[in-house]
Image (spheres, rainbow, N blue to C red):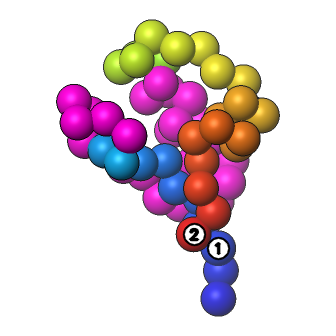
Amino acid sequence: MTNAHKLDCEAVSDECRFIIQSENEDEAIELAKNHMREVHEQDLTDDELREQHLQVV
């Protein structure tokens, strides 16, 4: 079974319902980085996203 990488804003915020999930970690990071920048005005590094926001499911 392949692991997926998931960002679930809905789990931590009642104001944002954004969820992504991808088996490709690079794709998940890129989508998460764009979302965090455009919606939450946060510029995060790949490592920050991995450690603080992405889950492996």
* Rendered position, 1 above or below 35: below
Q: Does the magenta stretch include residue 22?
A: yes
In three-dimensional space, the C-alpha distance between marks 1 and 2, rounded to whole angstroms, equals 6 Å
SS class, disc 1: loop
Front residue of 30/3: it is 3
Residue 12 figure quarter = top left
Q: Residue at x 58, y 40 (%)?
A: 53
Q: Give the range drawn in magenta.
A: 12-36
* Rendered position, 16 above or below 18: above
| Residue 7 percent location from the top left of the image | 49, 47
Badge 1 vs badge 2, beta-carbon distance below 8 Å: yes
SS class, disc 2: loop
Question: Disc 1 or disc 2, which is closer to the eye?
Answer: 2
Q: Mark 2 points at which residue?
A: 57
Q: Mark 1 points at which residue?
A: 3
Q: Does the magenta stretch include residue 32?
A: yes
Q: Residue at x 70, y 43 (%)?
A: 50
Q: In which quarter of the image is the N terminus?
A: bottom right
Q: What residue type is labelled 2?
A: Val
Q: Residue at x 71, y 30 (%)?
A: 48
Front residue of 52/24: it is 52
